[in-house]
Amino acid sequence: MTKLLCLGELLIDMLPQDAHNSAYLPIPGGAPANVAVGYAKLGGEAAFCGGKGDDHFANQLSNALAQYNVNTDYLFTIAGSQTAMVIVSLDETGERSFGFYRHNTADVLLTQAHLAQINWQSISTLHFCSNTLTDPAIASTTVKALELAKTHNKLVSFDVNLRYSLWENTHDIASNVKACYTYCDIVKLSRDELNFLAKHSETTGEDYIQMLLNTGVKLVFLTDGPEPAKVYHSAFILNESAPKINAVDTTSAGDAFIAGVLYYLNNLGSNLMLADKLNDETSIKNALHFALQCGSKACLAKGAFPALPVLADVIQTVKAPNGGA
């Protein structure tokens, strides 16, 4: 039982087709959907839970998930709704900026009634992001999903993945995000997100991470662009430099990274139980190494789903520091 269930938004990324951002191509995306596809492309069993629009983009989105062998049993069509859209612009280094078109779209209309259809016995891990915390109704649905996951003793992964423009009041971000930590086993933050959340919590970055660990979070993954990534556990801290690459598009780098973490812990490495791996320094060191390879590979092509790596491409570059892949 290693199925990953990703909860959240499935939307259309409008990706630039030239260096001047003068023309755009509609591509399926959304951070949790990217993670589901990334996990499946590595060879894992993944499912997606979210709302699907009742418009001409709906089939493109569901077909894209199916193309990459992501289970869509919990992808629910919301009658009369539209698909969310994000305009992705790239600068000369491949870094992104986002413009969201997301008002009462299908991704925020998932309800607790939809969650009642989930077969938790077939799932090992629930993964989500903060984009389903921006509106009170979908935030309530998200927290209910976390409660159900913990009731069924499932691992919960949270990639904070802040998109500030989606929040009506950015002062709500820190408290809404913090409310989820009590349910989480794994939290992923970027350095910018850590700095923002620490500032709005009136604390330092180091103390913020310690607060997470004190809350019961087992692992905090901290990424920092080309700088070394770190993992914080109550008993150890690990770090490893990211591979040096010439990035084409960083759209799915963070999603590929967390997909790699979750795939490694669920499917590779030692024969320890999943819960025990979270406390095993060697397992976590190898998971970090594997995830960094996944993230770097995803930067070498444009788009989200197509750029996410397959296992064979990652294994070619993996030199596990302890115990092999």
Image (cartoon, rainbow, N blue to C red):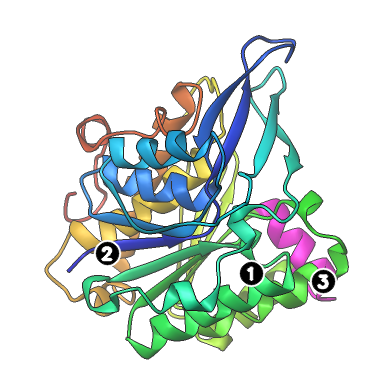
* Residue at x-position 57% and y-position 87%: 214
Q: Which residue is mark 1?
A: 138
Q: Is residue 243 at all visible to an observer of this figure?
A: no
Q: Is residue 94 at all visible to an observer of this figure?
A: yes
Residue 164 location (% of width, % of height): 78, 53
* Front-lying residue, 304 or 204: 304
* Residue at x-position 15% and y-position 64%: 270
Residue 48 location (% of width, % of height): 39, 56
Q: Which residue is mark 3?
A: 172
The residue under label 1 is which amino acid type? Ile
Identify the disc placed on residue 278: none
What range of the chain is rendered magenta?
Answer: 191-204
Task: Check contact, mark 1 vs mark 2: CB within 8 A.
Answer: no
Tell me which corner region of the image, top left, top right, bottom left or bottom right, holds residue 198.
Answer: bottom right
Cα distance, mark 1 to mark 3?
15 Å
Residue 265 in the figure: left or right of residue 172: left
The residue under label 3 is which amino acid type? Asp
Cα distance, mark 2 to mark 3?
37 Å
